[in-house]
Amino acid sequence: MNILKFIESFTNEGVIQSLQSKGSRRDSLSQFGKIGTNTALAAVPLVSMFFTQKANATSSAFLASAADTPISALQLALTLEYLEDDFYQMALDTNGLIPDAEKDIIAQISQHEAAHVSFLMGALGADAPAKPEFDFTANGTFDTFDNYQTFLALSQAFEDTGVRAYKGQAANLMSNGDLLTAALQIHSVEARHASMIRRMRNQKGWIVGNSIGTLPDIAAVHKIYDGEENTIQGGYNTTTAQATNGPALSGTGATESFDEPISGALASEIASVFFAV
Amino acid sequence: MKKTKVEVREVATGLASRRSFLKISGLTLAGTGLLLAGCSDDDDATGTNPDPNMLPGIVNGTFDLGGGDAGILTYAYALEQLEADFYTRVVNSNTFGATFNAEEQSVLTDLYRHEVIHREFFKAALTGALANTEGVVLPNLEFSYDSVNFSDRLSVLKTARALEDTGVSAYNGAGRYITNPDYLLIAGKIVSVEARHASAIRDLLNPGSADFAGNDVVDANGLDKAQKPSQIIPVVSSLDFIQTAFTAMYLP
């Protein structure tokens, strides 16, 4: 998939602003320790070599084609956690971006994402991919670290995507009970994050149909929520549920009550929008 | 296990003495809600005799959740029955509007809808899964909430928090015991919603804080809790909300 075409599909005027120069992101990145110092990178098996290049459409396609194994599941997870970890660290490092009243929340999320990176690197050992270089402005499309509302919008996108991505990998982890359990334990934390960020943006904590709410109305964002309108769960139609002794269930509960998975390929595609070009 | 008419009542003491059994096995029960008992002579406690082949149904006069995937589904159904019933009481209370502001009413009403849908989903799923077997769908459990004041905002929200966090831990801990990937996916679809609930309730209790995903539930690795059925069931039992006795002899 041609990443430039992908970015050209962004047409929402509200988010396309010229990027205020903040110095190069590479300079910013070097502040964030832990890059490439982990012993997991000392031995670099063939599969990891694909990730040590600057991430681009080729490597994201590789991610998408990975086998449905526990290792590939965790490699996808780690890549998403790298993204979130960098994203929140940069935000916390950007003076004046996060209002004081919300710093504790963002700091807690950031702490968790960093912990997830460490945990998954430990679990993967030599199979841990290197961290891609990220560009959270998507080559100038988003004023991510200049505009708190943009930052929060992307945060919601990342968290809701992460929940769906972990869910999509659960079956690939069934052969290893410990790893499956850990993945479930991370997945529910991402869901706590998603709920909090959504509510900070005056949305419900749960996903309503396939609605993108107040996120930018662009194709990439719709990909995050397409499928969430599903009302058939294991053959059961959730719209037919009846209240037995309380108020009628009419409303959006039928889709809100179940979250949906996404494939590794789609998760990779969404993440790759934010790989540096 | 024979298909019997479902008559759910307090456990008849098929054991010589229920109290002495509990002392022997070291189990403690805060309330009368649940009996955790092995039915073999060597005093197996719950969790030590998992059996994936046991279907849910009456054993010695008490409903047992069963083992294997059907047992996990039944266990989930029991927990969803509890949550659905609790939130039904919350939204039905004639002080609901006075106790909670508009946002809180909206959240609690959504939680009511979601948990009722979860409950009805499991009822349908188990009805289908147990058709043409000797397994029995868990009947409607009875509940009471003596320790909850439905006119007290904190009492309701703290109870909601406990139920949601427990639900997250229960689903996270049960996942590894599910053998059918379709059921695992369903459990995954539900647990993230329970975690969204937990986050919202915790934020209502302490707005603007880190409590939505606090260090009391998320550990240093960034992992939420995960407990197996034999760990969760005593916790739920100690709340003393479920008044119908059941056993879980064949779940891990």
Image (cartoon, coloured by chain):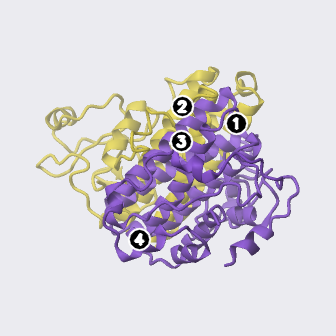
Closer mark to the observer between disc 3 and disc 1? 1
Mark 1, residues whose alpha carbon is within 10 Å: few (<14), some, or many (≥20)? some
Q: Is residue A11 above or below residue B151?
A: below
Residue at 30% x, 40% y is B35
Chain A takes which shade in the image?
purple
Mark positioned earlier in the residue sequence (1 or 4): 4
* Percent position of residue B38, x then y: 21, 48
Q: Are marks 3 and 1 in contact (CB under 8 Å)?
A: no
Question: Quick one: SS at disc 1?
Answer: loop
Residue A48 numbered tag? 4
Of labels 3 and 2, the one closer to you: 3
Instruction: Of the two numbered discs 3 and 1 on the same chain, state the one appearing first in sequence.
Output: 1
Element at label 2: helix
Residue receiving disc 1: A97
**Mark carried by residue B211:** 2
Name the subunit of mark 2: B
Count how many numbered circles sit on residues in the image.
4
Q: In the image, what residue type sits under mark 1?
A: Leu
**Is A247 drawn above or below residue A72 in the view shown?**
above
Q: Chain of mark 1?
A: A
Q: Is B33 or A172 nearer to us in this picture?
A: A172
Using a 10 Å C-alpha cutoff, classify the residue at mark 4 as few (fewer than 14 neighbours), some (14 to 19) or many (20 or more). Answer: some
Mark 4–mark 3 distance (CA, rounded to whole Å): 25 Å
CA separation in Å, label 3 and label 1: 15 Å
Of residues A214 and B75, the one nearer the viewer is A214
Looking at the rendered structure, the kind of residue marked 2 is Asp
Q: Which mark is residue A110?
A: 3
Residue farthest left in this picture: B42
Q: Are marks 2 and 4 in contact (CB under 8 Å)?
A: no
